[in-house]
Amino acid sequence: MSGHIFLKTAAMVLLFVLASVVHAAVVHTAGDAAAGKVQVTACVACHGQDGATGLDGSYPNLAGQHEKYLLRQLQAIQSGDRAVLLMAGQLTNKTEQNLADMAAYYASLPAKSSQAVGEDEQVAMAQQIYRGGIARKDVAACTACHNPSGTGNAAAGFPHLAGQPAQYTTVQLKAYRENQRVTDATYGGMMRDIAEGLTDTEIGALADYIQGLR
């Protein structure tokens, strides 16, 4: 492991620890899953009744996603910090409590898994990136924050990745790489930093691998 990638991974672990401490110290709006079910009536059109069978692979699976992460994304979309064209206006009249309830509802649903469809060589490359990073390009391993099984970390607000549609993940990684998605600012821009070192081929393979994680 190169010195740079070691330092980067160490910094990510430190951020994880600090995020966990902040989570424990700060009182967040408590979400009510039952109330959230009422708030997401319009959401089923794109995300499905179960939060994981949307119209196509461009929509993220929300079922089983961590509540803290979901709330942060809903807040970012509502404020405009995260631009999602199809979500424009959907959260305009939602209160902070409404958003917390929506996050709690989707977090309460069972997560779904999907089948990866990549070739063996792509899977091997993606597994290496996910578990070991790319030392020569200072790309840190995804496991540092998202867990070897892709379940992320609820306390730190690191999302559950396993089972996410490859199409959706590909778009998000490219958005981070092109500095079009900046929702990692809380964590020092580490997703943009990592994605910057990934080619389209590596992103595609990684996205497919993540889809098949269980």
Image (spheres, rainbow, N blue to C red):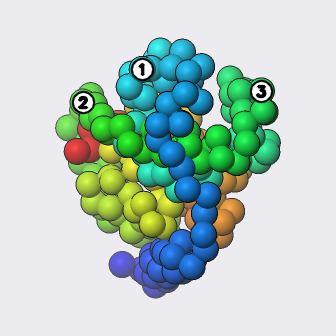
Q: Position of residue 144 (x, y in %)?
A: 39, 68
State the SS at label 3.
loop
Could you tell me how far apart the alpha carbons at marks 2 and 1 are, in whole angstroms? 20 Å
Label 2 sits on what residue type?
Answer: Gln
Instruction: Read off the residue under disc 3.
Output: 89
State the SS at label 1.
loop
CA neighbours of label 2 inside 10 A, class few (<14), some (14 to 19), many (20+): some
Q: Position of residue 102 (x, y in %)?
A: 55, 39
* In-front residue for pair 5/80: 80
State the SS at label 2.
loop
Q: Residue at x 23, y 45 (%)?
A: 214
Instruction: Read off the residue under disc 2.
Output: 115
Instruction: Read off the residue under disc 1.
Output: 49
For residue 39, which quarter of the picture?
top right
Q: Position of residue 57 (x, y in %)?
A: 45, 23
Label 1 sits on what residue type?
Answer: Gln
